[in-house]
Amino acid sequence: ENVTVKKHSSMGCAVVSLKDPRVREAILRLGAEVTINGIKVQMKPHYDKDTKVEVMTDIFVAWGRQVEKTTPLSERELSKFFDTKHQDLSHALRREVEDRARMVEERTRQQRLIEEQQKQQAEQREREEQRRRFEEDMRRREEQEQQQRQVEAQRRLVDEQRRQEDQRRLQRETQAKWVNDLQQGAWAGGVPAGADPRAATLASTSSATAAPAASGTGGSWQTHP
């Protein structure tokens, strides 16, 4: 039972007790006066007569002694009126609670969606940053390897140039030594050990040619003074 009415005999007033305090507050917010069966009824919060404390489930209603004498309001009529109000307002409150719950749920869903989007965006940025670092590392490594290859190629070129220079120097030294040995052999009339036989032949031929020429010249002078 949602409503209980306690009427004060013929005084034209009563106390209406409602099951849900929220409904009682909603009824009081409707105004200080309602009309029941064509009779204007005043409403206000009810206080305990002993403690003077407001009873949060009760409403004090009054329509006056004179009205009660001519057109009395029964507890049944009061109960019917406030029970209808209770049902209507209960439904409204329930819808309000449900709407509020849906709004909270929707806000929660939206918040989760935003958080998920932010998470995905953060993960995407992290993947892009990782890819950027990877590509940067690969590029730097490629540059280092390219520089290393260039250094290695330059070193091999320098080594080859040095080797060729050493080879040419050795050839020059060998040639100079050969010429020197050849000249010394020609002057001495012999062939030094290890010298080229062609050099010895050349030296002998040169000596033999020089001797007759000298002898022939002297005889000519003696025969023809």
Image (cartoon, grey):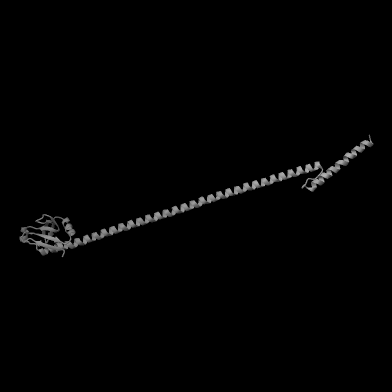
Q: Position of residue 97 (x, y in %)?
A: 24, 59
Q: Position of residue 61 (x, y in %)?
A: 11, 58
Q: Quadrant of residue 92?
A: bottom left
Is residue 44 something that shows in the picture? no
Of the pair 187 and 1, the residue shown nearer to us: 187
Of the pair 81 and 193, the residue shown nearer to us: 193
For the point 28% across and 58% down, the residue is 104
Q: Position of residue 84 (x, y in %)?
A: 16, 63
Is residue 106 something that shows in the picture? yes
For the point 11% across and 63% down, the residue is 77
For the point 59% across and 49% down, the residue is 152
What count of labels does the image hold? Answer: 0
Left or right: where 163 falls relative to 104? right
Left or right: where 166 falls relative to 70? right
Q: Quadrant of the C terminus?
A: top right
Q: Quadrant of residue 170?
A: top right
Q: Quadrant of the N terminus?
A: bottom left
